[in-house]
Image (spheres, rainbow, N blue to C red):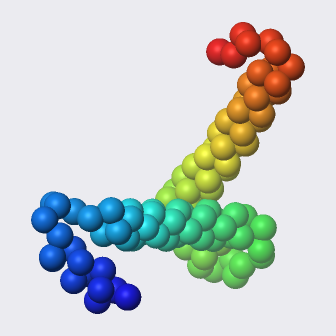
Amino acid sequence: MAASARASAHVSSFPESSETASVESLALQACDDIDSLHEVQRAYAGLEKLIVPQGVNDTEEVYPTRTELSALVRVVNEELQRRIATADITMQSLRVALGGGDVQ
């Protein structure tokens, strides 16, 4: 299937077929998702270092790094923003459904 997608991209007179654009879009989204998962993993590592007792002789293992704490704060903030946006969209839809067309 990938070979046929490449073949149709070469044969097409258009600069980029919609199938190729779709595949490229999915590939970019997959890369973004993987980066997001890495960010969550760093956040988890920082949180784990705060909760799980470690050996007291190695300060690198005991204390979360600035990068890990930054990732933790960023992940929590992004999730909070996502939930606020979802609630806002729900409220706007509810206003429209109830006939109060004063959506802002």
Q: Going by the image, does 73 lie left or right of 33?
A: right
Query: Relative to the observer, which residue lies in front, 87 or 34?
Result: 87
Answer above or below: position of 98 versus 24. above
Q: Quadrant of the C terminus?
A: top right
Give me the residue at 77% from left, 21% from top.
96
**Residue 16 appears at what percent x and percent y?**
22, 62
Q: Quadrant of the N terminus?
A: bottom left
Instruction: Mark yes or no: residue 34 visible.
Output: yes
Seen from the viewer's position, the closer of residues 98 and 49 is: 98
The residue located at (17%, 61%) in the rendering is 14
x and y, in percent, of residue 33 in the image: 51, 66
Q: Is residue 85 left or right of residue 34?
A: right
Residue shown at 72% from the left, 39% from the top: 86
Q: Quick check: 8 above or below 80? A: below
The image quadrant of residue 84 is top right
On screen, residue 88 above or below 2? above
